[in-house]
Image (cartoon, helix red, strand yellow):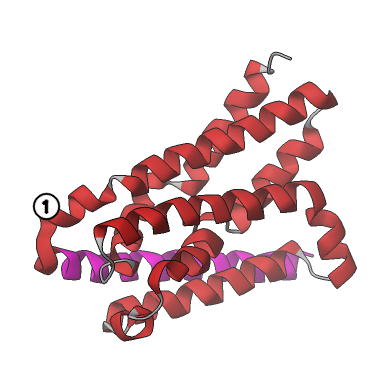
Amino acid sequence: MPIDIATFTSAFVTLIVILDPPGAIPVFLALTRSLGSKARTKAALRASLVALLVIASFAVFGQQILDYLHISLAALQGAGGLLLLIVALQLLTGSESEQLADAGVNVALVPLGTPLLAGPGAIVATMLAVRGAHGVREVASVGLALVAALLVVWLTLRFAGRLHRLLRESGIVLLTRIAGLLLSAIAVQMVADSIRAFVAG
């Protein structure tokens, strides 16, 4: 069954913009700075798979889950923003090394897999794309676009280790502080969007 090119392209481009693979590199390197090369590679794969599982689950069952728990998308967005803000503050203060020293590849689950990759933006975009799809062909095209987008994310994070070796420890520390600043801005924006949605609703 051939895919619908227009649906695939639209969903793929939207997800790539939201997931922002290059923008995830500084945070990924900061959170995995204490890991070895093999563990960092495993973390990249696990984060991508977790994001795929979470986004796909919400694309299929998301509205039912939120309705059953009486949770709005704005609440989900606010919670994700607060979680990212905690991580951002750890990166800015340098306390993430103690927090994540024994975490191993579990950092791939939280906060890498979710809510950094599988955040409210990606979840909502995929839910809307599935909702707007007509027929099995277009739904399959959205699903393939999601897989392709997270494949790009995985490849980006997979080879981020080369950047780690190039920057060395001092460069990674600097990159960690910059990542913390950027991540805190993203977190505050998510919380602000959540508050705006509550007020508008």
In magenta stretch: residue 170: no
Q: Residue at x 32, y 53 (%)?
A: 25
| Quadrant hosting residue 200 | bottom right
Q: Specify start and end residues of the magenta stretch as a single range.
A: 172-201
Q: Residue at x 26, y 68 (%)?
A: 33
Helix, strand or loop for disc 1: helix
- Number of labels in the image equals 1
Nearer the observer, 144 or 82: 144
- The location of residue 120, given as percent across then percent down, is 62, 58
**Is 104 on the left or on the right of 56, as rendered?**
left
- The location of residue 191, given as percent across then percent down, is 57, 71
Residue extending farthest front: 38
- The location of residue 145, given as percent across then percent down, is 60, 32
**Is 115 on the left or on the right of 103, as rendered?**
right
- The location of residue 26, given as percent across then percent down, is 30, 58
At label 1, which amino acid type do we have?
Leu
Q: Is 160 placed above or below 5 here?
A: below
**Is 168 on the left or on the right of 184, as rendered?**
left
Q: Which residue is mark 1?
A: 166
